[in-house]
Amino acid sequence: MTKEFVYEGKAIYFLGKAYSLKIREGGNGKRVRAERLPDCFLVQGSRLTKERIKAALEDWYIYNARIRFKNRCAHYAPLIGVTYHDIRIKNQKSRWGSCSGQGNLNFNWKLIMAPEEVLDYLVVHELCHRKHMNHSKEFWALVASILPDYKKQERWLRDNENKVLIW
Ligand SMILES: [Zn+2]
């Protein structure tokens, strides 16, 4: 039997697009699996609970966030003229990203729910900190040289913080 519903009244977002969530009970495996289909997310497994569904979706998000952030950092770093050490995908309540003095870039996996341009902006923002470890005029000029409309993405983050950060 397949039940279909929108998780806790919210759509499931991936790169800014809203998906419905389909739940399929059954199967003999103990694992709960999440996958993205063209028009919905499908979570299937046995003994499904809200927590297990959420955990499976989170695993899927984190796995795909890692791939996406790695690709986008590799794309933008040479354009900005910087290098980095490691990319870490974090579960942070209040931060979108950060850049350590050692060159490690940390990103909040929940950004994978945001539109692509917003995710790219965070990548560029943290990479620009490899040149300027502050939010000086020079820092913002460097961001703008790569993404002239970055303020639009900043605004999106401010306006949608409560939708995306709460999960
Ligand atoms: Zn910053």
Image (cartoon, rainbow, N blue to C red):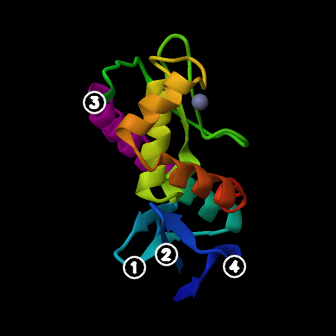
Residue at 46% across, 18% down: 130
* Callout 4: SS: helix
Residue 142, given in percent of the width and then of the height, sits at: 43, 29
Drawn side of residue 156 relative to residue 16, left or right: right
Residue closer to the observer: 133 or 91: 133
Please check the rendered image and state whether residue 65 is part of the magenta-colored stretch, yes or no. yes
Query: Left or right: where does residue 116 sit relative to residue 108?
Result: left
Query: Can you see residue 154?
Result: yes
Q: Which residue is at the front of the view, 57 or 122?
A: 122
Pointer 3 residue? 79
**Alpha-carbon span between mark 4 and mark 3:** 41 Å
Badge 2 amino acid:
Tyr
Q: Which residue is mark 1?
A: 39
Of mark 4 and mark 1, the one earlier in the sequence is: 4
Q: Identity of the amino acid at label 1? A: Asp
Type of amino acid at the residue the image marks with label 4: Gly
Residue 91 found in image quarter: top right
Return the disc, 4 or 2, that comes first in the chain's sequence: 4
Please report contact status of discs 2 and 1: CB closer than 8 Å, yes or no.
yes
For marks 3 and 1 on the same chain, the one whose residue lies earlier in the sequence: 1
The quadrant in which residue 47 appears is bottom right
Q: Quadrant of ligand 1?
A: top right
Q: Looking at mark 3, is its residue's CB closer than 8 Å to ligand 1?
A: no
Q: Which residues are magenta?
A: 61-78
Query: Is 128 or 88 nearer to us in this picture?
Result: 128
Q: Earlier in the sequence, mark 2 or mark 1?
A: 2
Name which residue lies at 49% across and 75% down. Answer: 19
Q: Nearer the viewer, mark 4 or mark 3?
A: 3
Q: Which residue is mark 4?
A: 9
What whole-number distance in Å separates the C-alpha atoms at marks 2 and 3? 33 Å
Q: Which residue carries the number 2 mark?
A: 19
> Where residue 83 appears, x then y in whole percent?
35, 18
